[in-house]
Amino acid sequence: MTPSNRARNGPPWRGQLYDILFETDTLWGRIFDIALIVIILGSVLVVMLDSVASIAEAHLGLLEGLEWAFTILFTFEYAARLASVQSKRRYALSFFGIIDLLAIIPTYLSVLLPGTRFLVIIRVLRVLRVFRVLKLVRYLGEARTLGRALAASRYRIIVFLITVLVLVVILGSFMYLIEGPAAGFTSIPVAVYWAVVTLTTVGFGDITPNTAVGQILASVIMLLGYGLIAVPTGIVSVELAQAVHRGRGPPGTLDRVCSGCRTGGHDANARFCKTCGGTVVDVGQE
């Protein structure tokens, strides 16, 4: 939510409410944020404790009471945020708006779906309450910088994932030909699953090669996996370092990067890259 969504018209209390709910540089805004973080953590803790059978049976009434208390608090918070913004639809459809709604609807829906035939649905709805932990994202000051780094490296990560996908299909097919159903490689999809588990160095051990050739190929895949793990880390690390550097730059040079070579530090009114001549855009608007 950005300040541009602040209600410009209406009673004064609406603007004051917006400052408390969305602005963190005010005293009451900081107090509200700290209190809300405590409430979010407490509600997630209640959900976790409710999943432990012994605790749920011994403290059923207390856990239910706390759950309804948290739900009512989050309901008032959601209603207050809707009342304080200028565009209610914009907030309701935003990431945080959806998360705020997910924090309250499971408890209400579990009441509207009684009966044993809906026990599975109720269980899913109860688990959905852990999405409240995502409400903490708005309080992470560096989340925007990390988001810029991930957005800037998305194309290279996609290419990397496609390469890995092709690699596991080829390696899995080879292993299927080498080992066959006798060793548990009953089909190419099963062999590809084994290749993914091995390449990522997880190694469940549910399927293992028996022949010498298969073991040699498995060893090569394991060693290859160590190298592949470093690739996405390096990609994101480089973009994260550049994003941090741009964030510390002088006024007028923030968030101005080339859409082609990703060079930053351009003037606020620059239209073309000073390095490659590509179009200069604001980060997040490519």
Image: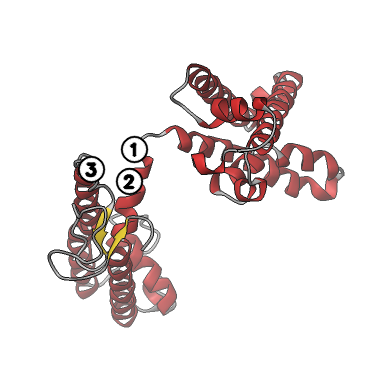
Q: Residues within 10 Å of mark 3 (few under 14, many from 20)?
A: some
Q: Which mark is residue 146?
A: 2
Figure quadrant of residue 72: top right
Q: Which mark is residue 142?
A: 1
Answer left or right for 26 relative to 284.
right
Answer left or right for 67 relative to 214.
right
Lower sequence index among marks 1 and 3: 1
- Return the residue at label 3: 244
Q: Which mark is residue 18?
A: none
Residue 113 horizontal/vertical position (percent): 83, 45
- As displayed, is residue 93 above or below residue 276? above
- As displayed, is residue 45 above or below residue 106? above
Display coloring: secondary structure
Q: In this view, which residue lies farthest toward the right?
A: 115
Mark-to-mark CA distance, 2 and 3: 9 Å
Q: Amino acid at mark 3?
A: Val
